[in-house]
Image (spheres, helix red, strand yellow):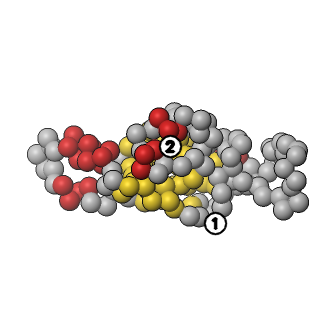
Amino acid sequence: MRIEQIEENFKIDIGAPMPTILSNEYSLYLIFYIRDVDPNWDGKSVKVRNKKNNGIVTVKFDGFTQYKFGNPNDETIDGHPLYKFGLEPYSIQKVIGSEWIKELMKMNSVHPAHKDEYFKDYEHFIFFFHDTCLEVVATGYSFEKDSESNMREEIQRVCKLL
């Protein structure tokens, strides 16, 4: 088993990314703030996020089968069972050779129509934030291109899709 870092063209906000999960039986969305990089920041002041800030990302998970959301946070990441494989905070990662997917396959094996091949396209993704961690088993994910300009409006937009 190993952890593979996924690089995107943004960075997760390390202060208050405010990850929000919206889900039903068939769809799973993740909305969060990305890092607002100020090239003139001297590191001596605190920047409070403007509620109208449009630095948000919406992720839609394709073919999700299960997710976990909550602990650990960035201060207790070394307690996560995948830490020894290279799990890092404030990043997006994929678990190669995931035990979780193997467990899901084993649970499903009691179904009369079960075939291991049904699980070949599943991947284990981890979005690690400041105070929480989201782990998802899905066939993939994509970024929504029609995101609203702020968190509240985006949550309302995505709720209409569920």
The residue sitting at 40% across, 39% down in the picture is 81
**Residue found at x 84% / y 45%:** 47
Q: Give coordinates of residue 99: x percent, y percent.
A: 30, 46
Q: Is residue 147 above or below residue 73?
A: below
Above or below 120: residue 73: above
How far across and down, in percent of the image, does residue 77 sit?
52, 39
Q: Quadrant of residue 68?
A: top left
Q: Which residue is mark 2?
A: 134
Residue found at the far front of this picture? 84
Where on the picture, by quarter, is residue 48?
A: top right
Element class at badge 1: loop
Name the residue tied to disc 1. 9
Q: Is residue 24 in view? A: no
User: Which residue, as the protein is rendered here, is positioned at the far left?
Assistant: 112
Whether tag 2 and tag 1 are in contact, CB under 8 A, the answer is no
Q: Position of residue 7 (x, y in %)?
A: 56, 64
